[in-house]
Image (cartoon, rainbow, N blue to C red):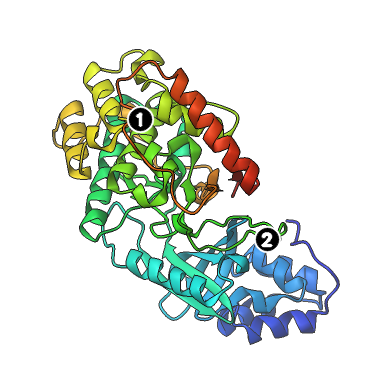
């Protein structure tokens, strides 16, 4: 087995780092070293420890580069890197005192580059930590360690729903609706605690397969409290991701799943915006396609406000009319025309698929095996858009620019929206599409 990538380092320095940063407990380390019959260099020693199963390849690589200190963040020992991008890095880590393996997110330093930003970060994640529900990824810890801001989450060893659909194609109706129902149940719990997610999408929904292959598995919502941490680029700081603070005229969300009112103003987003995003997500699960395809974020935003609501059955045969109806109501242009609570959504989906004992035919079940157990994290924060509007206040929402869910003649409104947003983009740089964890 090939050893980890390396630069030159002595075997003494290699071992010194292991002990200093407590990467491997002394007893198994000594046992592995005793098995060596000859003196070896650092790279050969790393390969031996890797083959002994007491050190990961990622750890070996860091140690061989003299970066052992980077494997320790307070009580957490870094095991593997799961993903990285503009918002930071995600690691599999272990709380060494408790022996608990977690997902540890290290936020990029420029996301928390002011006292106000740090206060905002802590307030958001503390609120998220109060959410205890089977359909929500549990937040265990949020802290600053040696100037590094971390968020420690439950590790879900399964795919996210975007990865699942990309790999397998559209899901059976019963499975797709059951997954959406579970998400609605989790959102209902969040609503009781006054929280809105603001970025519901397939890549933020993690699937833990059930040990019983006849059951669909457990879906968990990730990243509560993080949607508003998405960075924006300011004039004068072209190399920075900018501040995490949410300004009054900022759009935050993902174009393929963004509710029309959330595009107008973050402050208009409420739980019904999450319901809209969940409707778009259910459409994707059923069809394997986003409801309003396009090549640019702006194009997609406009379509969400102006184009007719698509029916999943138009792309995939066999989808019942009542499921079309549920998706259509979830994706209504006006919040008042949607289901008003996630609980209503959950009830409608349960009725659409037929409430029974929860057992699914084996042919519909998701297998326990997963070729990439950490795929859950690969698309987190993917395609999040952050666009500041021109001016000091949110463009007013009046009857003249409201778009009803059943209106068909959209050309005039669409032209107006294009003009308004185009002026805003010229004045404020452009739409920023963040492709993270690809």
Per the image, label 1 sits on a secondary structure element best described as loop
In screen coordinates, is 272 left or right of 165? left
Residue 98 versus residue 304 in the image, above or below: below
Q: Which mark is residue 353?
A: none
Mark in the foreground, 1 or 2: 1
Q: Label 1 to label 2, Cα distance in Å? A: 38 Å
Q: Quadrant of residue 18?
A: bottom right
Q: Nearer the viewer, residue 118 or 207?
A: 118
Residue 290 in sight from this viewpoint = no
Residue 344 versus residue 362 in the image, above or below: below
- Picture residue at 33% right of the left edge, 67% below the top: 127
Q: Mark 2 and mark 1 in contact (Cβ < 8 Å)?
A: no
Residue 6 versus residue 294 in the image, above or below: below
Image coordinates for residue 374, horizontal then vertical, percent:
51, 51
In screen coordinates, is 263 left or right of 353? right
Q: Earlier in the sequence, mark 1 or mark 2?
A: 2
- Picture residue at 38% right of the left edge, 20% below the top: 308
Q: Nearer the viewer, residue 336 or 110?
A: 336
Image coordinates for residue 23, horizontal then vertical, percent:
60, 77
Per the image, label 2 sits on a secondary structure element best described as loop
Image coordinates for residue 319, horizontal then vertical, percent:
30, 18
Residue 275 in sight from this viewpoint = yes
In screen coordinates, is 132 left or right of 35? left
- Picture residue at 30% right of the left edge, 44% below the top: 183
- Picture residue at 65% right of the left edge, 87% below the top: 20
Q: Which mark is residue 400?
A: 1
Q: Quadrant of residue 346?
A: top left
Instruction: Give the quadrant of the C terminus.
Output: top right
Instruction: Give the quadrant of the N terminus.
Output: bottom right
Residue beneath label 2, please? 240
Question: Badge 2: how crowded within 10 Å, few (<14), some, or many (20+)?
Answer: some
């Amino acid at each position: 087995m090939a050893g980890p990538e390396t630069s030159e380092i002595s075997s003494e320095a290699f071992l010194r780092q292991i002990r200093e940063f407590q990467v491997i407990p002394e007893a198994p380390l000594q046992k592995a070293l005793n098995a060596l019959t000859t003196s070896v260099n650092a790279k050969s020693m790393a390969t031996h420890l890797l083959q002994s199963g007491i050190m990961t390849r990622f750890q070996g690589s860091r140690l061989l580069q003299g970066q052992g200190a980077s494997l320790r963040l307070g009580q957490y020992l870094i095991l593997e890197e799961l993903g990285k991008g503009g918002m930071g890095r995600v690691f599999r880590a272990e709380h060494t005192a408790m022996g608990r393996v977690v997902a540890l997110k290290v936020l990029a330093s420029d996301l928390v580059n002011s006292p106000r930003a740090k206060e905002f970060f802590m307030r958001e994640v503390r609120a998220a930590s109060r959410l205890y529900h089977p359909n929500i990824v549990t937040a265990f810890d949020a802290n600053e360690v040696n100037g590094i801001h971390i968020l420690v989450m439950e590790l879900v060893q399964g795919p996210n729903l975007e990865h699942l659909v990309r790999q397998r194609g559209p899901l059976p109706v019963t499975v797709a609706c059951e997954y959406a129902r579970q998400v609605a149940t989790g959102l209902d719990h969040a609503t009781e605690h006054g929280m809105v997610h603001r970025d519901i999408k397939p890549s933020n929904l993690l699937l833990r397969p059930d040990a019983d292959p006849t059951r669909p598995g457990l879906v968990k919502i990730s990243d509560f409290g993080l949607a508003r941490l998405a960075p924006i680029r300011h004039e004068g700081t072209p190399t920075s991701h900018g501040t995490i603070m949410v300004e009054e005229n900022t759009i935050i969300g993902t174009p393929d799943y963004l509710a029309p009112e959330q595009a107008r103003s973050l402050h208009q987003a409420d739980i019904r915006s999450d319901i809209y995003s969940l409707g778009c997500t259910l459409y994707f699960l059923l069809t394997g396609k986003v409801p309003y395809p396009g090549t640019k974020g702006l194009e997609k935003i406009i379509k969400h406000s102006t184009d007719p609501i698509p029916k999943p059955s138009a792309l995939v045969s066999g989808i019942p009319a009542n499921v079309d109806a549920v998706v259509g109501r979830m994706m209504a242009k006006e919040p008042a025309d949607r289901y008003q609570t996630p609980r209503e959504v959950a009830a409608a989906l349960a009725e659409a698929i037929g409430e029974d004992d929860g057992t699914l035919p084996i042919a519909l079940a998701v297998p326990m095996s997963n070729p990439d157990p950490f795929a859950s994290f690969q698309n987190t924060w993917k395609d999040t858009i952050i666009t500041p509007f021109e001016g000091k206040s949110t463009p007013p929402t009046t009857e003249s620019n409201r778009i009803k869910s059943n209106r068909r003649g959209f050309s005039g409104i669409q032209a107006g929206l294009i003009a308004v947003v185009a002026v805003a983009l010229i004045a404020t740089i452009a739409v920023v599409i963040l492709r993270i964890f690809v």
